[in-house]
Amino acid sequence: MIDEIRQATQKLASGIGVLGLINIQYAISESKLYVLEANPRASRTVPFVSKATGRQVAKAAALIATGIKISELRKVGILPKNGDGAAKGISVKEAVLPFNRFRRVDGEGVDSVLGPEMKSTGEVMGISPTFGAAFAKSQIAAFGALPQNGAIFISLSDKDKGEAVASVKGLSELDFELYATLGTHKFLESHGISTQLVAKHSEKDGNKGAVSAVDLINQGKIALVINTPFGRGAAKDGRKIRTAAVARGVSCITTLPGLKAAVEGIRELRRGKLTARSIQDWHAS
Protein backbone atom coordinates (compact mmCIF):
# COMPACT_ATOMS: atom_id res chain seq x y z
CA MET A 1 0.00 0.00 0.00
CA ILE A 2 2.92 2.39 0.68
CA ASP A 3 4.13 1.99 -2.90
CA GLU A 4 0.59 2.62 -4.16
CA ILE A 5 0.37 5.81 -2.10
CA ARG A 6 3.75 6.97 -3.37
CA GLN A 7 2.76 6.36 -7.00
CA ALA A 8 -0.59 8.12 -6.52
CA THR A 9 1.16 11.11 -4.95
CA GLN A 10 3.59 11.40 -7.85
CA LYS A 11 0.77 11.21 -10.40
CA LEU A 12 -1.32 13.82 -8.59
CA ALA A 13 1.58 16.23 -8.16
CA SER A 14 2.57 15.84 -11.80
CA GLY A 15 -1.01 16.22 -13.02
CA ILE A 16 -1.62 19.35 -10.96
CA GLY A 17 1.76 20.76 -11.96
CA VAL A 18 3.08 21.30 -8.45
CA LEU A 19 6.64 22.46 -7.87
CA GLY A 20 7.40 22.32 -4.16
CA LEU A 21 4.95 21.00 -1.60
CA ILE A 22 1.60 19.27 -1.93
CA ASN A 23 -0.73 18.21 0.89
CA ILE A 24 -2.82 15.11 0.10
CA GLN A 25 -5.37 13.49 2.39
CA TYR A 26 -5.85 9.78 1.75
CA ALA A 27 -8.28 7.22 3.15
CA ILE A 28 -7.98 3.43 2.93
CA SER A 29 -11.05 1.20 3.01
CA GLU A 30 -10.99 -2.54 2.30
CA SER A 31 -7.50 -2.23 0.79
CA LYS A 32 -8.69 0.44 -1.66
CA LEU A 33 -7.04 3.86 -1.72
CA TYR A 34 -9.22 6.98 -1.87
CA VAL A 35 -8.14 10.61 -2.28
CA LEU A 36 -10.07 13.00 -0.04
CA GLU A 37 -8.32 16.17 -1.14
CA ALA A 38 -5.12 17.42 -2.74
CA ASN A 39 -3.83 20.95 -2.06
CA PRO A 40 -0.69 22.59 -3.53
CA ARG A 41 0.50 23.92 -0.18
CA ALA A 42 2.41 22.97 2.93
CA SER A 43 0.89 21.20 5.94
CA ARG A 44 1.69 20.81 9.62
CA THR A 45 3.62 17.67 8.74
CA VAL A 46 6.36 19.74 7.05
CA PRO A 47 7.99 21.10 10.24
CA PHE A 48 7.65 17.65 11.80
CA VAL A 49 9.57 16.08 8.92
CA SER A 50 12.15 18.86 9.13
CA LYS A 51 12.75 18.18 12.82
CA ALA A 52 12.84 14.42 12.29
CA THR A 53 15.38 14.57 9.46
CA GLY A 54 17.31 17.73 10.29
CA ARG A 55 16.61 19.10 6.80
CA GLN A 56 15.01 22.46 5.94
CA VAL A 57 12.15 20.98 3.95
CA ALA A 58 10.08 24.17 3.71
CA LYS A 59 13.08 26.20 2.56
CA ALA A 60 13.99 23.62 -0.07
CA ALA A 61 10.39 23.49 -1.35
CA ALA A 62 10.16 27.28 -1.56
CA LEU A 63 13.39 27.46 -3.56
CA ILE A 64 12.22 24.67 -5.89
CA ALA A 65 8.97 26.60 -6.46
CA THR A 66 11.05 29.59 -7.65
CA GLY A 67 12.80 27.46 -10.28
CA ILE A 68 15.96 26.33 -8.47
CA LYS A 69 16.93 22.76 -9.35
CA ILE A 70 17.15 19.99 -6.76
CA SER A 71 20.72 19.30 -7.98
CA GLU A 72 21.68 22.86 -6.99
CA LEU A 73 20.19 22.41 -3.51
CA ARG A 74 22.25 19.25 -3.09
CA LYS A 75 25.43 21.11 -4.02
CA VAL A 76 24.91 23.79 -1.35
CA GLY A 77 23.86 21.27 1.32
CA ILE A 78 20.21 22.25 1.76
CA LEU A 79 19.29 18.75 0.57
CA PRO A 80 21.49 15.66 1.06
CA LYS A 81 23.57 14.27 -1.79
CA ASN A 82 21.09 11.44 -2.17
CA GLY A 83 17.43 11.08 -1.22
CA ASP A 84 15.44 13.48 0.91
CA GLY A 85 17.18 13.02 4.26
CA ALA A 86 16.99 10.17 6.74
CA ALA A 87 15.65 10.42 10.27
CA LYS A 88 17.95 9.61 13.16
CA GLY A 89 15.99 7.33 15.41
CA ILE A 90 12.19 7.25 15.48
CA SER A 91 9.91 10.28 15.67
CA VAL A 92 6.28 10.11 16.82
CA LYS A 93 3.79 12.94 16.25
CA GLU A 94 0.86 13.28 18.64
CA ALA A 95 -2.11 15.60 18.36
CA VAL A 96 -3.06 17.78 21.31
CA LEU A 97 -6.78 17.32 21.89
CA PRO A 98 -8.17 19.62 24.63
CA PHE A 99 -11.42 17.69 25.20
CA ASN A 100 -11.41 18.57 28.90
CA ARG A 101 -11.95 22.26 28.08
CA PHE A 102 -15.32 21.75 26.44
CA ARG A 103 -18.85 20.74 27.36
CA ARG A 104 -21.91 20.03 25.24
CA VAL A 105 -24.92 22.34 25.43
CA ASP A 106 -26.63 19.81 27.73
CA GLY A 107 -23.73 20.08 30.18
CA GLU A 108 -22.18 16.68 29.45
CA GLY A 109 -18.52 16.31 28.61
CA VAL A 110 -17.44 15.73 25.02
CA ASP A 111 -16.67 12.31 23.58
CA SER A 112 -13.03 11.60 22.78
CA VAL A 113 -13.78 9.37 19.77
CA LEU A 114 -12.14 10.86 16.69
CA GLY A 115 -13.67 11.28 13.26
CA PRO A 116 -12.46 12.91 10.03
CA GLU A 117 -12.99 16.46 11.29
CA MET A 118 -10.11 18.49 12.75
CA LYS A 119 -10.19 18.54 16.55
CA SER A 120 -6.56 19.08 17.52
CA THR A 121 -5.25 22.47 18.62
CA GLY A 122 -1.61 21.61 18.14
CA GLU A 123 0.92 18.83 17.85
CA VAL A 124 3.93 17.54 19.77
CA MET A 125 6.63 15.02 18.92
CA GLY A 126 8.82 12.53 20.70
CA ILE A 127 12.20 11.39 19.36
CA SER A 128 14.09 8.32 20.57
CA PRO A 129 16.10 5.35 19.27
CA THR A 130 13.10 3.08 19.96
CA PHE A 131 9.44 3.42 19.05
CA GLY A 132 8.23 2.73 22.60
CA ALA A 133 10.30 5.53 24.10
CA ALA A 134 9.36 7.96 21.31
CA PHE A 135 5.66 7.21 21.83
CA ALA A 136 5.95 7.59 25.61
CA LYS A 137 7.62 10.99 25.15
CA SER A 138 4.87 12.13 22.79
CA GLN A 139 2.21 11.23 25.36
CA ILE A 140 4.01 13.12 28.13
CA ALA A 141 4.24 16.21 25.90
CA ALA A 142 0.55 15.98 25.03
CA PHE A 143 -0.44 15.97 28.74
CA GLY A 144 -1.50 12.35 28.67
CA ALA A 145 1.43 10.49 30.22
CA LEU A 146 1.13 6.70 30.22
CA PRO A 147 0.76 5.07 33.66
CA GLN A 148 3.48 2.81 35.03
CA ASN A 149 1.23 1.07 37.55
CA GLY A 150 -2.33 0.99 38.83
CA ALA A 151 -5.58 -0.21 37.28
CA ILE A 152 -6.70 -0.25 33.66
CA PHE A 153 -10.27 -0.54 32.41
CA ILE A 154 -10.76 -2.44 29.14
CA SER A 155 -13.82 -2.59 26.89
CA LEU A 156 -13.30 -3.96 23.39
CA SER A 157 -15.68 -4.12 20.45
CA ASP A 158 -16.22 -7.60 19.02
CA LYS A 159 -14.21 -6.81 15.90
CA ASP A 160 -11.16 -5.83 18.00
CA LYS A 161 -11.13 -8.58 20.62
CA GLY A 162 -8.97 -11.11 18.79
CA GLU A 163 -6.29 -8.66 17.71
CA ALA A 164 -6.12 -7.08 21.16
CA VAL A 165 -5.25 -10.28 23.06
CA ALA A 166 -1.46 -9.97 22.77
CA SER A 167 -1.45 -6.34 23.91
CA VAL A 168 -3.78 -6.97 26.86
CA LYS A 169 -1.64 -9.95 27.85
CA GLY A 170 1.31 -7.58 27.83
CA LEU A 171 -0.48 -5.27 30.28
CA SER A 172 -1.23 -8.25 32.51
CA GLU A 173 2.44 -9.29 32.44
CA LEU A 174 3.32 -5.73 33.50
CA ASP A 175 1.23 -6.38 36.66
CA PHE A 176 -1.54 -3.90 35.97
CA GLU A 177 -4.86 -4.59 37.65
CA LEU A 178 -7.34 -5.11 34.82
CA TYR A 179 -11.09 -4.37 34.88
CA ALA A 180 -13.56 -5.26 32.13
CA THR A 181 -17.28 -5.44 31.39
CA LEU A 182 -18.92 -8.81 30.82
CA GLY A 183 -18.27 -9.43 27.11
CA THR A 184 -14.61 -8.40 27.26
CA HIS A 185 -14.16 -10.13 30.64
CA LYS A 186 -15.38 -13.49 29.30
CA PHE A 187 -13.36 -13.24 26.10
CA LEU A 188 -10.10 -12.39 27.88
CA GLU A 189 -10.74 -15.10 30.47
CA SER A 190 -11.06 -17.64 27.65
CA HIS A 191 -7.56 -16.60 26.57
CA GLY A 192 -6.06 -16.98 30.03
CA ILE A 193 -6.14 -13.29 30.98
CA SER A 194 -7.63 -12.49 34.36
CA THR A 195 -9.76 -9.33 34.77
CA GLN A 196 -12.13 -8.05 37.44
CA LEU A 197 -15.72 -7.87 36.24
CA VAL A 198 -17.53 -4.52 36.47
CA ALA A 199 -21.09 -3.64 35.50
CA LYS A 200 -22.09 -1.57 32.52
CA HIS A 201 -23.26 1.85 33.66
CA SER A 202 -26.67 1.24 32.06
CA GLU A 203 -27.10 -1.95 34.12
CA LYS A 204 -26.80 -0.24 37.49
CA ASP A 205 -30.47 0.71 37.77
CA GLY A 206 -32.09 -1.55 40.36
CA ASN A 207 -28.81 -3.33 41.06
CA LYS A 208 -27.69 -2.02 44.43
CA GLY A 209 -24.00 -2.23 45.12
CA ALA A 210 -23.07 -2.63 41.45
CA VAL A 211 -19.93 -0.73 40.46
CA SER A 212 -19.43 0.44 36.90
CA ALA A 213 -16.38 1.62 35.00
CA VAL A 214 -17.69 5.18 35.24
CA ASP A 215 -17.81 4.85 39.04
CA LEU A 216 -14.23 3.58 39.18
CA ILE A 217 -13.03 6.42 36.94
CA ASN A 218 -14.84 9.05 39.01
CA GLN A 219 -13.36 7.55 42.18
CA GLY A 220 -9.85 7.98 40.77
CA LYS A 221 -9.16 4.24 40.72
CA ILE A 222 -8.43 3.92 36.98
CA ALA A 223 -5.10 5.02 35.51
CA LEU A 224 -5.87 4.23 31.87
CA VAL A 225 -9.02 3.54 29.83
CA ILE A 226 -9.03 1.32 26.75
CA ASN A 227 -12.33 1.54 24.90
CA THR A 228 -12.59 0.66 21.22
CA PRO A 229 -16.06 1.62 19.95
CA PHE A 230 -17.52 0.38 16.69
CA GLY A 231 -18.36 3.18 14.25
CA ARG A 232 -19.43 6.75 14.95
CA GLY A 233 -22.65 5.69 16.69
CA ALA A 234 -20.79 4.28 19.70
CA ALA A 235 -22.85 2.77 22.49
CA LYS A 236 -24.13 5.06 25.21
CA ASP A 237 -22.10 3.25 27.87
CA GLY A 238 -18.92 3.76 25.86
CA ARG A 239 -19.61 7.46 25.56
CA LYS A 240 -20.13 7.81 29.33
CA ILE A 241 -16.88 5.95 29.97
CA ARG A 242 -14.89 8.17 27.63
CA THR A 243 -16.41 11.44 28.85
CA ALA A 244 -15.73 10.40 32.47
CA ALA A 245 -12.11 9.74 31.52
CA VAL A 246 -11.84 13.18 29.90
CA ALA A 247 -13.34 14.87 32.97
CA ARG A 248 -10.88 13.11 35.31
CA GLY A 249 -7.85 13.65 33.07
CA VAL A 250 -7.41 9.91 32.53
CA SER A 251 -5.78 8.87 29.27
CA CYS A 252 -8.24 7.09 26.99
CA ILE A 253 -7.17 4.85 24.10
CA THR A 254 -9.81 4.15 21.45
CA THR A 255 -7.86 2.27 18.75
CA LEU A 256 -5.89 -0.98 18.51
CA PRO A 257 -2.76 0.74 17.12
CA GLY A 258 -2.94 3.09 20.13
CA LEU A 259 -3.19 0.13 22.50
CA LYS A 260 -0.19 -1.62 20.95
CA ALA A 261 1.85 1.58 21.07
CA ALA A 262 0.88 2.19 24.71
CA VAL A 263 2.16 -1.23 25.77
CA GLU A 264 5.52 -0.55 24.13
CA GLY A 265 5.63 2.91 25.68
CA ILE A 266 4.88 1.61 29.19
CA ARG A 267 7.63 -0.99 28.87
CA GLU A 268 10.13 1.76 28.01
CA LEU A 269 8.93 3.89 30.94
CA ARG A 270 9.42 0.93 33.26
CA ARG A 271 13.00 0.59 32.02
CA GLY A 272 13.54 4.22 33.01
CA LYS A 273 15.65 5.07 29.98
CA LEU A 274 13.91 8.20 28.69
CA THR A 275 16.32 11.05 28.05
CA ALA A 276 15.90 14.61 26.76
CA ARG A 277 18.08 16.20 24.08
CA SER A 278 17.74 19.27 21.91
CA ILE A 279 16.97 18.90 18.20
CA GLN A 280 20.42 20.36 17.44
CA ASP A 281 22.21 17.81 19.64
CA TRP A 282 20.13 15.00 18.24
CA HIS A 283 21.14 15.69 14.63
CA ALA A 284 24.74 16.58 15.50
CA SER A 285 25.41 13.10 16.93
Image: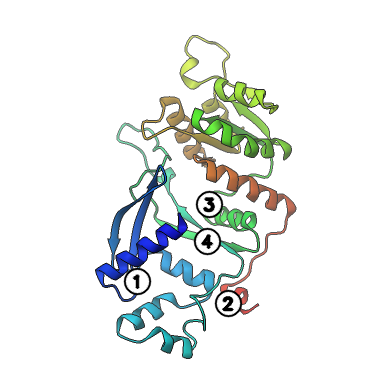
Q: Secondary structure at mark 1?
A: loop
Residue 201 seen in this snapshot: yes
Q: Secondary structure at mark 4?
A: strand
What label does residue 280 carry, if any? 2
What label does residue 153 carry, if any? none
Colour pattern of the rendering: rainbow
Q: Which mark is in front, 4 or 3?
A: 4
Whole-angstrom CA distance, mark 3 to mark 1, is 31 Å
The amino acid type of the residue labelled 3 equals Phe
Badges 3 and 1: C-beta atoms under 8 Å apart? Answer: no
Whole-angstrom CA distance, mark 1 to mark 2, is 25 Å
Q: Residues within 10 Å of mark 2 (few under 14, many from 20)?
A: few
Q: Residues within 10 Å of mark 3 (few under 14, many from 20)?
A: some
Against 29, is 136 above or below? below
Badges 2 and 4: C-beta atoms under 8 Å apart? Answer: no
Q: Which residue is mark 3?
A: 143
Counting residues from the N terminus, which is met first, the one under dot 4 or under dot 3?
A: 4
* x and y, in percent, of residue 207 in the image: 53, 10
Q: Which residue is mark 4?
A: 125
Q: Nearer the viewer, residue 193 or 113?
A: 193
Against 163, is 72 above or below? below
* x and y, in percent, of residue 87 in the image: 56, 70
